[in-house]
Image: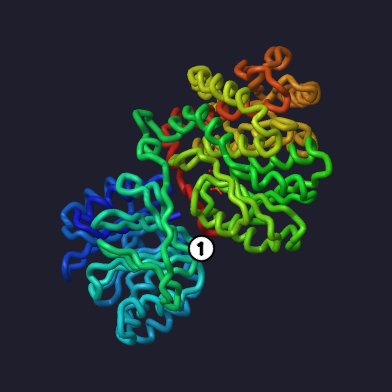
Amino acid sequence: MCGIIGYVGHRSASKILTDGLKCLEYRGYDSVGIAVLNGQNLEIRKDKGMVADVSSGSRFDSLSGSIGIGHSRWATHGGVSKENSHPHSDCTGSIAIIHNGVIENYQELKSSLLSKGHKFASQTDSEVVSHLFEENLKQFPTPLIAFSKTISALEGSYAIVLLSKSSPDVLFLARKNSPLVVGKGAGENFCASDFSALLTYTREFLVLEDSQIATIDRDSIALYDLLLTPKTPSFLTIDWDVQTAERSGHPHFMIKEILEQPDVVSAAFSADVSQVLPLLEKFEKIHIIASGTSYHAGLLFSILLNKYKSGKFANVFIASEYQNQVLPDSNALIFAISQSGETADVLQALRYSTSPHKVCITNTQGSSITRLCSHSIYLNAGPESSVAATKTFLAQLCVIYKLLFGDRYRDSIRSTILASTKHSAKIQEFSKSIITNRFIFFLSRGLCLPLGFEGSLKLKEISYLHSQAYPAGELKHGTLSLIEKGVCALFLAPKTPDATKLFGNLKEVKARGGTIFTLTDDPSFKSESDMSLDIVPQTDPLLYPFSFVVPLQLLAYYSSVSLGINPDRPRNLAKSVTVE
Ligand code: F6R
């Protein structure tokens, strides 16, 4: 969840670290810090707050030196405070470390270090790493051996970068269950928790694998396993360009990412699914695993498989519950959907599964999920910087339709998405009425059910309005008791054969005084609504889910903006959720 950046080369480290931390802001954080080494002078500056404020308040720019590390923290162990911000140091101020993940045995390590006289400055689990390295430096002949001994003692998950006066030209890196990449430059090298922070400098990346250690100096990159056996690094080239990772004149990443979705359709349909189609043909039992927005894509996938592909028995699981709901099953074909490819809940579910056939659908090359799966399908959606997933959700749906129906619907989907992006002004107006409600239900049925869930999640995520999605027919089994004057229900009402039942559900809400909003192409819904948006193009019933993708994203976006919230950085949330 936190962000990591490291630099060694010939330029000012503080500038590169500060710029990198700005690029990583989208991940969500509450404090930031950097450490820069200049000869034997190691300086750490850090505080709680945003990059712009902390970097200017603590004068990051006054640190000279061309090797350093930077970190944005999302608090887990220990509150949000200056002391708990990274980098952390040792007792002598000779070492600085940054860490993402959770050191599960930190209490045990800390007690042992305290008994040896170490003094801790924070409540974090991370600080044990710098003190343990300090201790190991006394015992082992080289800093690299001391580092490998330190890493070998850790349990849990980590991406760690360490800077030490003992090796003033080298950054030490280690990774387990938390992403860390090395960016290769000329006369300079970089590391980061994800590619996007480094795209200005390089496209050539080495993705560290679990239980690997690396050292980088300005001219070389060396890779080892935990026993320090050298490994040959293999680099991959990332073709995302910097512009796609910038806002390009839009007020927020989210609106930029919503509006670029017509191109996302074409890119997602170019995904290579050829290796996976035979598996999909062969397996009867299919388990789909995902979290959040990706779960909603998975829900539509499972409905389509069960209803439109005979002989398939598909189940979709919320990743964090997978282990609680099934025994490991080697006869199931697994689909894991995760745009980041780093969601800890999904990774853990994949580790639990004993199936040899695991397919991931992800946007991130080299991500952890690709290592746990036998097959990878890439979304090709380009970098998504807004915390709320938008274009990657659409890309997931496109890949799912490609898997099930080939390219048959590509052009219609693209036209629907393009048409929806033109309705911004109407939806902005609509959102003004939505945000006056204290409670908003999203009600839908059939193939549009997952879209109701997604619309509701997006709205609550970035506008903080209380919202809940329900299968419309389920309301009468309990939740209808909440409907009264002042409660609002938004119906996703395409003109499908199921429309009569949904219409009945609308009447139930209306009869109890609820305010009715509809997104519909059906005149009968329109006439019963307090407010209705006729922006749903009539289409093949199979494609109606696509009619709602952009309108619901825009509704959430404009609600958030009208309420004075920054939709790109909703409170308490992070883009890549690397803890369980
Ligand atoms: C909501 C959102 C989250 C993610 C969830 C899974 O807008 O972005 O609900 O969908 O955290 O993330 P990935 O797809 O990276 O596994």
Few, some or many residues within 10 Å of mark 1 (<14, 14–19, 20+): many
In the shown orientation, is residue 575 left or right of residue 552? Answer: left
Vertical order, 406 against 431 (above or below): below
Give x and y (percent) for residue 2. Answer: 42, 55
In the shown orientation, is residue 14 left or right of residue 111? Answer: left
Q: Secondary structure at mark 1?
A: loop
* Residue 123 visible in this rendered orientation of the protein: no
Give the quarter of the figure containing the C terminus. Answer: bottom right
- Picture quadrant where residue 466 is located: top right
Give x and y (percent) for residue 107. Answer: 46, 76
- Picture quadrant where residue 509 is located: top right
Q: Nearer the viewer, residue 240 or 259?
A: 240
Give x and y (percent) for residue 561. Answer: 44, 30
**What kind of colouring is applied to the model shown?**
rainbow
* Residue 109 visible in this rendered orientation of the protein: yes
Vertical order, 269 against 360 (above or below): above
Q: Nearer the viewer, residue 553 or 476?
A: 553
In the shown orientation, is residue 26 left or right of residue 166? Answer: right
The residue lying at 68 percent from left, 56 percent from top is 357
The residue lying at 62 percent from left, 16 percent from top is 534
- Residue that mark 1 sits on: 177
Give x and y (percent) for residue 426. Answer: 52, 17
Mark 1 beta carbon near ligand 1 (under 8 Å): no
The residue lying at 25 percent from left, 61 percent from top is 218
Q: Nearer the viewer, residue 213 or 560?
A: 213
